[in-house]
Image: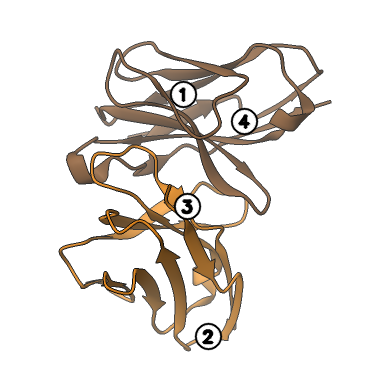
Chain colours: A orange, B brown
Amino acid sequence: GENVEQHPSTLSVQEGDSAVIKCTYSDSASNYFPWYKQELGKRPQLIIDIRSNVGEKKDQRIAVTLNKTAKHFSLHITETQPEDSAVYFCAASRGGSYIPTFGRGTSLIVHP
Amino acid sequence: NAGVTQTPKFQVLKTGQSMTLQCAQDMNHNSMYWYRQDPGMGLRLIYYSASEGTTDKGEVPNGYNVSRLNKREFSLRLESAAPSQTSVYFCASSDGTYLSNQPQHFGDGTRLSIL
C-alpha cells in the first residue's frame, strides 16, 4: 500500500519568512496530492491540491510542487503570517480511490 | 450555507454503551466520509460512501457501522463503545469526481470520550 512521510514534524519561522513542508510517497500510481490546514481545535480545510499532470500550482502565498520521478511533493508558504500557524497535512491517492494516505502532519509556528 | 454539520460536538460514554454520530451536508455532494483523528496519528478513514446507497470500509472500520440515509446524511454508529474509540471524529464530503474522491469539506468534529 501507499506510504506517505512528511517532514519536518515541527517548523518554527519568523513572520515574513518562507516555510517549506515536504512529503514523499511510495506508490508511483498515486496521482492526486491534496494539502490540508488544521488550526488548533478546528476542522481540517483543503487549501490546495495538485494532480500528477501538473508540476506546480500556486494560489496567492501558497504553492505546491510535485516531482513524480523522485516521488515527492512540497508545500511552500511565502511571507508567512501568524494566522498561518496550524498543522498541515499532506495526502496521496490514486485516481478513483476514496482512501487517501495522509502524512502525520507538520506543526507550523509563525512568530510575530 | 452550513456546509457539513455534525452532532453532537462533545460526548462522554461508558464502555459498552452505544451511540450514533450524525452528519449532514447541504452542498449536494455525492461522497461522504467518516474519519477519526488521534494525537500523532493524523486522519484515518473509518468508512466512506461514494454515492447515495453505497458504503464501504476504510482503513479502521472495526467497531463501527454506518448508514447513508439519503444524499445529505451519513451517520456513524458505535454499537458497544470501547476506550480505544476515544477520539475526535470528523465527517467530510466531496463532489466525488474522479480525481477528487478525497474530502473537500469537513465538519467541526465530535470529541468522544469513552470511560
Compared to residue B20, the image places residue A79 above or below, namely below
Identify the subunit bearing mark 4. Answer: B
Question: Share a chain, discs 2 and 3?
Answer: yes
Residue nearest the viewer, comparing B55 with A72: A72
Name the residue carrying label 3: A102
Badge 4 vs badge 2, beta-carbon distance below 8 Å: no
Q: For residue B103, which quarter of the picture?
A: top left
Q: Position of residue B13 (x, y in %)?
A: 77, 20
Residue at screen point 54% across, 25% down: B61
Residue that sits furthest to the left in the current view: A53
- Comparing marks 2 and 3, which lies closer to the viewer? 3
Q: Which residue is mark 4?
A: B9
Dot 1 falls on a residue whose secondary structure is: strand
Identify the residue under disc 1. B23
Q: CA distance from mark 3 to mark 4?
A: 24 Å
Provide the chain ID for the residue under circle 1.
B
